[in-house]
Amino acid sequence: MEVNEKCDVYSFGVVAMETIMGRHPGDFFSSFLSVSSSSMSSLALTLPPHQMSVVDVLDQRILPPTHQEAGELLSLVKIAFSCLNPSPHSRPTMKKVSQLLSTSKLHLSKPMRMITCGELLTLDPLTA
C-alpha cells in the first residue's frame, strides 16, 4: 500500500457510500469492482451488483429521493464510485472531488429505478 493524496479520497468514497447505503459497502464493492456474478446475501438479491438498480442500493429506511434530489444523489454516487477505483492512480484528487460536488448534477432522462449501478459508471455527467 502506498500512502499518497489519493488514500483520503478512497476513505471519502467509503463514507459517502456508507451514508447512502445505510451500512458499510465493503462486500458490495468487492463484488461490484470484480464484476462478480455471485449474489449479495445481505441484500437478498440475485443480480450481480453491476446489474442492480441504484434504488436497490439506497438505504431503504429513508424516503426515496424526489426527481430533483435523484440527480444530485446519482452524481454523489458516481463521484463516490470514482473514489473507490481499485487503482489509486485512477482516483480523483480531493480537490477534484470538491469541484465535482459543487458543480456536478446528473439530469435524468429516465426514472432513477431504471438506472443500474453499472450504467451509472458510464453515464455522461450531463445526461442520464
Image (tube, rainbow, N blue to C red):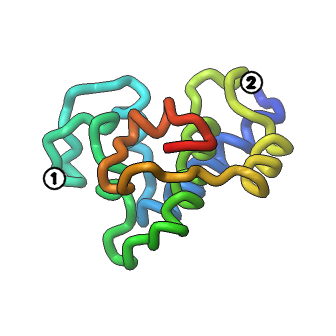
The residue at 39%/77% (across/down) is 62
Residue 9: name its quadrant.
top right
Sequence order check, earlier mark of 1 and 2: 2
At which x and y percent is residue 57?
A: 35, 55
**Residue 79 versus residue 103 in the image, above or below:** above
Query: Residue 47: where, in percent of width, then height?
Result: 19, 38
| SS assignment at label 2 | loop
The residue sitting at the front extreme is 109
- Using residue 38 as the reference point, say whether residue 52 is left or right of it: right
Query: Given the image, on which type of amino acid does mark 1 rest?
Result: Ala
The image quadrant where one finds the N terminus is top right
Q: Nearer the viewer, residue 91 or 52?
A: 52
**Between 49 and 6, the one nearer to me in the picture:** 49
Badge 2 density bin: few <14, some 14–19, many ≥20, Cα 10 Å: few
Relative to 3, is 75 above or below?
A: below
Q: Is residue 50 above or below residue 53?
A: above
For the question of whether residue 25 can be seen, the reply is yes
The amino acid at mark 2 is Glu
Q: CA distance from mark 1 to mark 2?
A: 35 Å
Residue in the foreground of this view, choosing between 52 and 29 = 52
Q: Is residue 55 left or right of residue 105?
A: left
Q: Residue at x 56, y 26 (%)?
A: 86
| Residue, disc 1 | 44
User: Could you tell me residue 108's position as x and y percent?
Assistant: 48, 52
- Using the image, tell me which numbered label, if any, was put on residue 126: none
Whether tag 1 and tag 2 are in contact, CB under 8 A, the answer is no
The residue mark sitting in front, 1 or 2, is 1
Residue 54 in the image: x percent, y percent?
37, 51
Residue 1 visible in the snapshot: no
Q: In this figure, what is the number of numbered marks? A: 2
Mark 2 = which residue? 2
Q: Characterize the local packing of mark 1: few (<14), some (14-19) or many (20 or more) Cα atoms within 10 angstroms.
A: few
